[in-house]
Amino acid sequence: MARYTEAVCRQCRREGEKLFLKGPKCYSEKCAMNVRPFAPGQHGKGRKKSSEYGIQLRAKQRARRIYGVLETQFRNYFAEAERRPGQTGTNLLQLLETRLDNVVYRCGFALSRPEARQLVLHGHFTVNGKKVNIPSYALKAGDEVAIASRSLEKEKIKAILEATATHPAPKWIDLNKDARAAKVISIPTREEIDIPVDEQLIVELYSK
């Protein structure tokens, strides 16, 4: 399975903002955006003003990196968003938000989306009572995600749950902290998706 294997902090520096890809480290003084708040590379400090294309590209790269999706998969999501009725940009964000790894992160069952992806791959979660180890698994309204019973005894899972004890879930997810489970109430509206991306720029980029 293809995945990004380089230093993820470079992604935040390239986008010029925190993408919260390293969990607790992103909130500490060791965060790369605090230590080196400029783009990586030899000319990182002297980058010129972006063109219209550059601004659109950055919007697409920001969304792709926030959700941990590679280029081909992101294009496939965009193609699916175009086929669906409604606004393409909103459809795209809804497809990304309802990925299993993202919902796991939104529920506080992981400290970051990359960690959520890893935990899903290792089979620590069930969907409607069945084990699912596919991070990109598309959830629908009414689906229930839960931590597998055997995983609740693992120290890593216990540490995550302790660290996210006060973590609030978005309105479109009904989180039951006691049962270590959550139910997708509805597909999120654009107002309920709080990522710093202008999806219309992505639509314009792919429409060229």
Image (cartoon, rainbow, N blue to C red):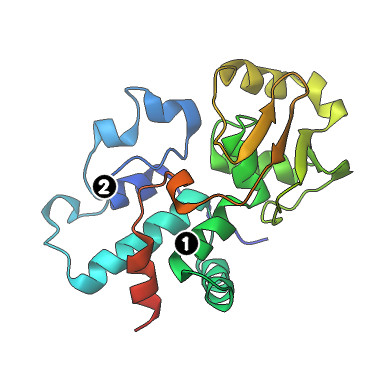
Residue under the point 60% across and 17% down: 165
As rendered, which of 114 and 60 lies closer to the eye? 60
Q: Is residue 128 left or right of residue 103?
A: right
Residue under the point 62% across and 61% down: 2
The mark that comes first in sequence, 2 or 1, is: 2
| Label number found at residue 192 | none
Q: Quadrant of the N terminus?
A: bottom right
Q: Which residue is mark 2?
A: 16
Which image quadrant for residue 84? bottom right
As rendered, which of 129 and 149 lies closer to the eye? 129
Foreground mark, 2 or 1, reads 1
Label 1 neighbourhood size at 10 Å, few (<14), some (14-19), many (20+)? Answer: some
Q: Which residue is mark 1?
A: 90
The reply to whether residue 124 is visible in this rendering is no
Tell me the kind of residue under disc 2: Gly
Q: Is residue 100 left or right of residue 87?
A: right
6 above or below 18? below
As rendered, which of 183 and 110 lies closer to the eye? 183
Residue under the point 64% across and 48% down: 186
Give the x, y percent position of residue 207: 38, 81
Which image quadrant for residue 152? top right
Tell me the kind of residue under disc 1: Thr
122 above or below 77? above
As rendered, which of 110 and 93 lies closer to the eye? 93
Contact (Cβ within 8 Å) of mark 2 with mark 1 = no
Give the SS element for disc 2: loop
Q: Quadrant of the C terminus?
A: bottom left
Label 2 neighbourhood size at 10 Å, few (<14), some (14-19), many (20+)? Answer: some
